[in-house]
Image (cartoon, grey):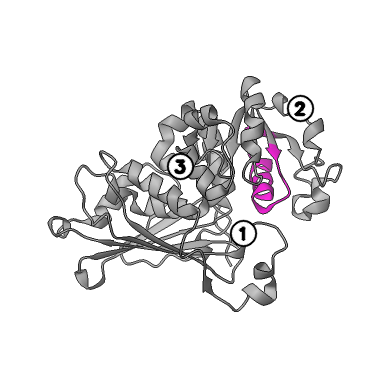
Amino acid sequence: MIKVGIVGGTGYTGVELLRLLSAHPRARLTAITSRNESGLHVAKMYPSLRGLVDLAFTSPDETRLTDCDVVFFATPHGVAMEQAPELLLGGVKVIDLAADFRFQDKVVFQEWYGMPHSQPDILAEAVYGLPEINREAIKKARVIGLPGCYPTTVQLGYAPLLRQDKPLIDESRLIADCKSGTSGAGRRAEIGMLMAEASDNFRAYGVSGHRHQPEIMQGLKAMTKNRREIGLTFVPHLTPMIRGIHSTLYATLLPEARDMDFQALYENHYRTDPFVDVMPAGSHPDTRSVRGSNFLRIALHRPGNGDTLVILVVEDNLVKGAAGQGVQCMNLMFGLDETTGLIHAPLVP
Protein backbone atom coordinates (compact mmCIF):
# COMPACT_ATOMS: atom_id res chain seq x y z
CA MET A 1 0.00 0.00 0.00
CA ILE A 2 1.13 3.55 -0.74
CA LYS A 3 1.26 5.56 2.49
CA VAL A 4 -0.16 9.00 1.70
CA GLY A 5 0.09 12.26 3.60
CA ILE A 6 -1.82 15.44 2.82
CA VAL A 7 -0.64 18.86 3.94
CA GLY A 8 -3.52 21.31 4.06
CA GLY A 9 -6.48 18.97 3.99
CA THR A 10 -9.24 21.45 4.87
CA GLY A 11 -9.78 23.21 1.53
CA TYR A 12 -11.75 22.08 -1.49
CA THR A 13 -8.82 20.37 -3.21
CA GLY A 14 -7.84 18.80 0.10
CA VAL A 15 -11.25 17.27 0.72
CA GLU A 16 -11.35 16.12 -2.90
CA LEU A 17 -8.07 14.30 -2.34
CA LEU A 18 -9.57 12.71 0.77
CA ARG A 19 -12.65 11.59 -1.16
CA LEU A 20 -10.62 10.02 -3.96
CA LEU A 21 -7.90 8.46 -1.84
CA SER A 22 -10.34 7.01 0.71
CA ALA A 23 -11.61 4.71 -2.07
CA HIS A 24 -8.24 4.06 -3.71
CA PRO A 25 -7.45 0.33 -3.55
CA ARG A 26 -3.67 0.81 -3.32
CA ALA A 27 -3.41 3.91 -1.10
CA ARG A 28 -3.66 4.32 2.66
CA LEU A 29 -4.25 7.75 4.17
CA THR A 30 -1.64 8.15 6.89
CA ALA A 31 -1.62 11.83 7.88
CA ILE A 32 -3.68 14.95 7.21
CA THR A 33 -2.28 18.19 8.56
CA SER A 34 -3.89 21.49 9.40
CA ARG A 35 -2.36 24.04 11.71
CA ASN A 36 -5.71 25.64 12.57
CA GLU A 37 -7.80 22.47 12.86
CA SER A 38 -5.35 20.20 14.70
CA GLY A 39 -7.22 17.60 16.75
CA LEU A 40 -10.47 17.96 14.83
CA HIS A 41 -11.76 14.75 13.28
CA VAL A 42 -11.99 14.94 9.49
CA ALA A 43 -15.60 13.70 9.53
CA LYS A 44 -16.51 16.52 11.91
CA MET A 45 -15.54 19.10 9.30
CA TYR A 46 -16.71 17.03 6.34
CA PRO A 47 -19.62 14.73 7.28
CA SER A 48 -19.54 13.39 3.71
CA LEU A 49 -16.46 11.42 4.77
CA ARG A 50 -18.04 9.75 7.82
CA GLY A 51 -17.16 6.07 7.78
CA LEU A 52 -14.61 6.62 5.01
CA VAL A 53 -11.82 8.62 6.63
CA ASP A 54 -11.07 7.71 10.24
CA LEU A 55 -8.40 10.34 10.90
CA ALA A 56 -8.08 13.64 12.70
CA PHE A 57 -6.17 16.66 11.47
CA THR A 58 -2.75 17.03 13.07
CA SER A 59 -0.37 19.93 13.42
CA PRO A 60 2.37 19.97 10.75
CA ASP A 61 4.99 20.38 13.50
CA GLU A 62 3.88 17.16 15.19
CA THR A 63 3.38 14.98 12.10
CA ARG A 64 6.04 12.60 10.79
CA LEU A 65 5.45 13.12 7.09
CA THR A 66 8.73 11.33 6.39
CA ASP A 67 6.91 8.09 7.29
CA CYS A 68 4.82 8.53 4.12
CA ASP A 69 5.64 7.35 0.61
CA VAL A 70 4.12 10.43 -1.00
CA VAL A 71 2.88 13.76 0.32
CA PHE A 72 0.33 15.95 -1.42
CA PHE A 73 0.40 19.69 -0.76
CA ALA A 74 -3.05 21.28 -0.98
CA THR A 75 -1.71 24.52 0.47
CA PRO A 76 -1.13 28.15 -0.48
CA HIS A 77 1.79 28.90 -2.76
CA GLY A 78 5.17 28.82 -1.00
CA VAL A 79 4.49 26.02 1.49
CA ALA A 80 5.56 23.00 -0.56
CA MET A 81 8.95 24.38 -1.53
CA GLU A 82 9.85 24.99 2.12
CA GLN A 83 9.02 21.43 3.21
CA ALA A 84 10.13 19.56 0.09
CA PRO A 85 13.87 19.27 0.94
CA GLU A 86 13.30 17.31 4.14
CA LEU A 87 10.75 15.03 2.50
CA LEU A 88 12.95 14.28 -0.50
CA LEU A 89 15.89 13.58 1.80
CA GLY A 90 13.68 10.99 3.51
CA GLY A 91 12.79 9.34 0.21
CA VAL A 92 9.26 10.78 0.09
CA LYS A 93 7.77 11.85 -3.24
CA VAL A 94 6.08 15.28 -3.45
CA ILE A 95 3.00 16.31 -5.42
CA ASP A 96 2.14 20.00 -5.15
CA LEU A 97 -1.29 21.29 -6.15
CA ALA A 98 -0.13 24.90 -5.88
CA ALA A 99 2.32 26.74 -8.14
CA ASP A 100 5.66 26.11 -6.41
CA PHE A 101 6.92 23.65 -9.02
CA ARG A 102 4.95 24.59 -12.14
CA PHE A 103 7.39 27.03 -13.69
CA GLN A 104 10.72 26.24 -15.25
CA ASP A 105 11.93 29.80 -14.64
CA LYS A 106 12.19 30.98 -11.03
CA VAL A 107 12.08 34.62 -12.20
CA VAL A 108 8.68 34.06 -13.80
CA PHE A 109 7.45 32.42 -10.60
CA GLN A 110 8.55 35.40 -8.53
CA GLU A 111 7.02 37.87 -10.95
CA TRP A 112 3.56 36.28 -10.81
CA TYR A 113 3.45 34.94 -7.26
CA GLY A 114 5.27 37.72 -5.45
CA MET A 115 7.87 35.63 -3.65
CA PRO A 116 11.36 34.36 -4.46
CA HIS A 117 11.73 30.65 -5.12
CA SER A 118 13.70 29.19 -2.21
CA GLN A 119 14.50 25.83 -3.83
CA PRO A 120 15.77 26.41 -7.38
CA ASP A 121 17.56 23.05 -7.47
CA ILE A 122 14.35 21.17 -6.70
CA LEU A 123 12.47 23.36 -9.16
CA ALA A 124 14.96 22.33 -11.86
CA GLU A 125 14.17 18.63 -11.38
CA ALA A 126 10.40 18.99 -10.89
CA VAL A 127 8.13 17.54 -13.57
CA TYR A 128 5.00 19.33 -14.78
CA GLY A 129 2.17 16.97 -13.86
CA LEU A 130 0.14 16.80 -17.06
CA PRO A 131 0.08 13.03 -17.78
CA GLU A 132 -1.14 13.32 -21.36
CA ILE A 133 1.97 15.36 -22.18
CA ASN A 134 4.61 14.21 -19.66
CA ARG A 135 3.60 10.65 -18.83
CA GLU A 136 7.07 9.05 -19.08
CA ALA A 137 8.78 11.83 -17.11
CA ILE A 138 6.11 11.62 -14.38
CA LYS A 139 6.85 7.91 -13.92
CA LYS A 140 10.43 8.73 -12.93
CA ALA A 141 9.77 11.94 -10.98
CA ARG A 142 10.34 12.69 -7.31
CA VAL A 143 8.59 16.07 -7.44
CA ILE A 144 5.45 16.99 -9.37
CA GLY A 145 4.10 20.48 -9.94
CA LEU A 146 0.47 19.99 -10.92
CA PRO A 147 -0.99 22.25 -13.60
CA GLY A 148 -3.60 24.83 -12.75
CA CYS A 149 -7.21 24.07 -13.62
CA TYR A 150 -7.50 26.49 -16.56
CA PRO A 151 -4.09 25.49 -17.97
CA THR A 152 -5.14 21.82 -18.09
CA THR A 153 -8.09 22.56 -20.39
CA VAL A 154 -6.22 25.01 -22.62
CA GLN A 155 -3.11 22.88 -23.06
CA LEU A 156 -4.99 19.65 -23.76
CA GLY A 157 -7.36 21.51 -26.06
CA TYR A 158 -4.54 22.86 -28.24
CA ALA A 159 -2.03 19.99 -27.90
CA PRO A 160 -2.96 17.99 -31.04
CA LEU A 161 -2.59 21.13 -33.15
CA LEU A 162 0.73 22.22 -31.70
CA ARG A 163 2.54 18.90 -31.39
CA GLN A 164 3.20 18.78 -35.13
CA ASP A 165 6.42 19.16 -37.11
CA LYS A 166 4.94 22.07 -39.07
CA PRO A 167 2.35 24.60 -37.88
CA LEU A 168 -1.28 23.90 -38.75
CA ILE A 169 -2.66 27.10 -37.24
CA ASP A 170 -1.62 30.70 -36.75
CA GLU A 171 0.15 30.13 -33.45
CA SER A 172 0.43 33.86 -32.78
CA ARG A 173 -3.36 34.34 -32.53
CA LEU A 174 -4.70 31.75 -30.10
CA ILE A 175 -7.73 32.73 -28.01
CA ALA A 176 -8.86 30.96 -24.83
CA ASP A 177 -12.24 32.07 -23.49
CA CYS A 178 -12.59 30.19 -20.20
CA LYS A 179 -15.26 29.94 -17.49
CA SER A 180 -14.95 28.46 -14.01
CA GLY A 181 -17.19 27.75 -11.05
CA THR A 182 -16.67 29.44 -7.72
CA SER A 183 -14.83 26.53 -6.07
CA GLY A 184 -11.82 27.47 -8.22
CA ALA A 185 -11.23 30.40 -5.87
CA GLY A 186 -10.77 28.09 -2.90
CA ARG A 187 -12.52 27.74 0.45
CA ARG A 188 -12.19 31.15 1.99
CA ALA A 189 -14.34 34.09 2.98
CA GLU A 190 -14.34 36.60 0.14
CA ILE A 191 -17.02 39.07 -0.86
CA GLY A 192 -16.98 38.13 -4.53
CA MET A 193 -17.70 34.48 -3.63
CA LEU A 194 -20.74 35.20 -1.44
CA MET A 195 -23.95 33.72 -2.80
CA ALA A 196 -25.52 37.15 -3.16
CA GLU A 197 -22.52 38.27 -5.23
CA ALA A 198 -21.73 35.24 -7.39
CA SER A 199 -25.22 33.82 -7.92
CA ASP A 200 -27.26 35.14 -10.84
CA ASN A 201 -24.11 36.86 -12.12
CA PHE A 202 -21.40 36.34 -14.73
CA ARG A 203 -18.19 38.30 -15.11
CA ALA A 204 -14.71 38.27 -16.58
CA TYR A 205 -11.65 38.90 -14.43
CA GLY A 206 -7.89 39.06 -14.83
CA VAL A 207 -8.20 40.25 -18.43
CA SER A 208 -5.11 42.46 -18.27
CA GLY A 209 -3.03 39.67 -16.76
CA HIS A 210 -3.68 36.39 -14.97
CA ARG A 211 -1.06 34.14 -13.33
CA HIS A 212 -2.25 31.16 -15.35
CA GLN A 213 -1.32 32.89 -18.61
CA PRO A 214 2.48 32.43 -18.29
CA GLU A 215 1.93 28.83 -17.18
CA ILE A 216 -0.20 28.15 -20.25
CA MET A 217 2.30 29.90 -22.52
CA GLN A 218 5.16 27.84 -21.09
CA GLY A 219 3.25 24.62 -21.74
CA LEU A 220 2.06 25.49 -25.23
CA LYS A 221 5.50 26.59 -26.35
CA ALA A 222 7.07 23.39 -24.98
CA MET A 223 4.69 21.33 -27.12
CA THR A 224 5.90 22.82 -30.39
CA LYS A 225 8.90 21.59 -32.32
CA ASN A 226 11.92 23.84 -31.70
CA ARG A 227 9.82 25.73 -29.11
CA ARG A 228 8.06 27.98 -31.57
CA GLU A 229 6.73 31.32 -30.33
CA ILE A 230 3.11 31.40 -29.16
CA GLY A 231 0.65 34.27 -28.92
CA LEU A 232 -2.33 33.78 -26.60
CA THR A 233 -5.26 35.90 -25.47
CA PHE A 234 -6.58 34.33 -22.26
CA VAL A 235 -9.77 35.62 -20.62
CA PRO A 236 -11.12 33.82 -17.53
CA HIS A 237 -14.70 34.23 -16.28
CA LEU A 238 -16.50 33.41 -13.04
CA THR A 239 -19.79 31.57 -13.50
CA PRO A 240 -22.58 31.02 -10.93
CA MET A 241 -21.92 27.32 -10.37
CA ILE A 242 -19.80 25.42 -7.86
CA ARG A 243 -17.77 22.99 -9.98
CA GLY A 244 -16.61 22.92 -13.54
CA ILE A 245 -14.59 24.63 -16.23
CA HIS A 246 -15.73 25.27 -19.80
CA SER A 247 -13.02 26.55 -22.13
CA THR A 248 -13.84 27.71 -25.65
CA LEU A 249 -10.63 27.82 -27.67
CA TYR A 250 -10.17 29.44 -31.08
CA ALA A 251 -7.51 28.73 -33.70
CA THR A 252 -7.08 30.17 -37.21
CA LEU A 253 -6.16 27.49 -39.72
CA LEU A 254 -3.29 28.03 -42.13
CA PRO A 255 -4.17 27.65 -45.83
CA GLU A 256 -2.16 24.44 -46.18
CA ALA A 257 -4.10 22.80 -43.33
CA ARG A 258 -7.65 23.58 -44.38
CA ASP A 259 -8.23 20.17 -45.97
CA MET A 260 -7.09 18.26 -42.88
CA ASP A 261 -9.47 15.99 -40.97
CA PHE A 262 -9.13 17.56 -37.53
CA GLN A 263 -11.60 15.18 -35.92
CA ALA A 264 -9.35 12.27 -36.91
CA LEU A 265 -6.29 14.22 -35.74
CA TYR A 266 -7.74 14.64 -32.24
CA GLU A 267 -9.12 11.12 -31.99
CA ASN A 268 -5.77 9.63 -33.00
CA HIS A 269 -3.81 11.94 -30.69
CA TYR A 270 -5.78 10.93 -27.59
CA ARG A 271 -6.52 7.32 -28.50
CA THR A 272 -4.39 5.99 -25.60
CA ASP A 273 -5.33 8.62 -23.00
CA PRO A 274 -8.01 7.12 -20.75
CA PHE A 275 -9.31 10.39 -19.32
CA VAL A 276 -9.55 12.47 -22.49
CA ASP A 277 -12.77 11.91 -24.40
CA VAL A 278 -12.86 13.30 -27.96
CA MET A 279 -16.58 13.52 -28.64
CA PRO A 280 -18.24 13.21 -32.07
CA ALA A 281 -17.74 16.22 -34.32
CA GLY A 282 -20.20 19.01 -33.60
CA SER A 283 -20.92 17.90 -30.01
CA HIS A 284 -21.49 20.41 -27.22
CA PRO A 285 -19.99 18.99 -24.00
CA ASP A 286 -21.29 20.51 -20.78
CA THR A 287 -19.69 20.74 -17.36
CA ARG A 288 -22.26 18.40 -15.84
CA SER A 289 -20.96 15.60 -18.08
CA VAL A 290 -17.69 15.57 -16.12
CA ARG A 291 -18.84 16.68 -12.67
CA GLY A 292 -17.10 14.70 -9.92
CA SER A 293 -14.96 12.75 -12.41
CA ASN A 294 -11.41 12.82 -13.77
CA PHE A 295 -12.62 12.97 -17.37
CA LEU A 296 -11.95 15.84 -19.74
CA ARG A 297 -14.15 16.07 -22.82
CA ILE A 298 -13.28 17.79 -26.09
CA ALA A 299 -15.44 18.63 -29.09
CA LEU A 300 -14.49 20.32 -32.37
CA HIS A 301 -16.43 22.77 -34.51
CA ARG A 302 -15.57 24.50 -37.77
CA PRO A 303 -18.28 27.09 -38.40
CA GLY A 304 -19.20 27.36 -42.08
CA ASN A 305 -16.26 25.08 -42.89
CA GLY A 306 -14.17 28.25 -42.69
CA ASP A 307 -10.69 28.91 -41.40
CA THR A 308 -11.60 29.05 -37.68
CA LEU A 309 -11.43 25.89 -35.58
CA VAL A 310 -13.39 26.05 -32.31
CA ILE A 311 -12.37 23.61 -29.60
CA LEU A 312 -14.73 23.08 -26.64
CA VAL A 313 -13.17 21.60 -23.51
CA VAL A 314 -14.83 20.75 -20.19
CA GLU A 315 -13.46 19.36 -16.91
CA ASP A 316 -14.22 19.32 -13.20
CA ASN A 317 -11.77 21.90 -11.82
CA LEU A 318 -11.40 20.03 -8.52
CA VAL A 319 -10.79 16.62 -10.08
CA LYS A 320 -9.01 16.63 -13.46
CA GLY A 321 -8.12 20.25 -12.73
CA ALA A 322 -6.53 19.43 -9.36
CA ALA A 323 -6.92 16.44 -7.00
CA GLY A 324 -7.81 13.78 -9.58
CA GLN A 325 -4.88 14.73 -11.76
CA GLY A 326 -2.68 14.50 -8.67
CA VAL A 327 -3.86 10.95 -7.99
CA GLN A 328 -3.34 10.12 -11.67
CA CYS A 329 0.27 11.29 -11.31
CA MET A 330 0.70 9.33 -8.07
CA ASN A 331 -0.42 6.17 -9.85
CA LEU A 332 2.17 6.69 -12.55
CA MET A 333 4.94 7.47 -10.04
CA PHE A 334 4.31 4.19 -8.19
CA GLY A 335 3.96 1.95 -11.24
CA LEU A 336 0.18 1.57 -11.09
CA ASP A 337 -2.27 1.82 -13.95
CA GLU A 338 -3.02 5.53 -14.09
CA THR A 339 -6.77 4.92 -13.88
CA THR A 340 -6.53 3.15 -10.49
CA GLY A 341 -9.10 4.59 -8.10
CA LEU A 342 -10.24 7.18 -10.64
CA ILE A 343 -12.90 5.53 -12.77
CA HIS A 344 -15.98 7.26 -11.43
CA ALA A 345 -19.05 8.07 -13.49
CA PRO A 346 -19.83 11.81 -13.45
CA LEU A 347 -22.62 12.99 -11.15
CA VAL A 348 -25.93 13.64 -12.94
CA PRO A 349 -27.95 15.73 -12.24
Number of the label disc, if any, that sits on residue 349: none
Mark 1 lies on a secondary structure that is: helix
Q: Quadrant of the C terminus?
A: bottom right
**On-image quarter of the N terminus:** top right
Q: How far separated are the C-alphas under marks 3 and 2? A: 29 Å
Q: Residue furthest bottom?
A: 200
Does 13 lie within the magenta span?
yes
Q: Is residue 109 visible?
A: yes
Q: x, y (%) of residue 75?
A: 66, 45
At which x and y percent is residue 130? 45, 42
Q: Secondary structure at mark 3?
A: loop
Looking at the image, which is closer to me, 208 or 155?
208
User: Compared with residue 334, is residue 97 higher up or lower down, i.e. above or below?
Assistant: below
Camera-nearest label, 3 or 1: 1
Q: Which mark is residue 185?
A: 1
Precedes in sequence: disc 1 or disc 2:
2
Mark linked to residue 64: 2
Q: Is residue 28 above or below residue 255?
A: above
CA–CA distance between discs 1 and 2? 30 Å
Q: Amino acid at mark 1?
A: Ala
Residue receiving disc 3: 130
Part of the protein shown in magenta: 6-28
Q: Please, is residue 330 above or below residue 113 in the view?
A: above
Amino acid on which disc 3 is placed: Leu
Name the foreground residue: 289 vs 75: 75
Tags 1 and 2 touching, CB below 8 Å: no
Q: Is residue 84 left or right of residue 164?
A: right
- Relative to 319, 23 lies left or right: right
Residue 222, percent across and down?
A: 35, 41
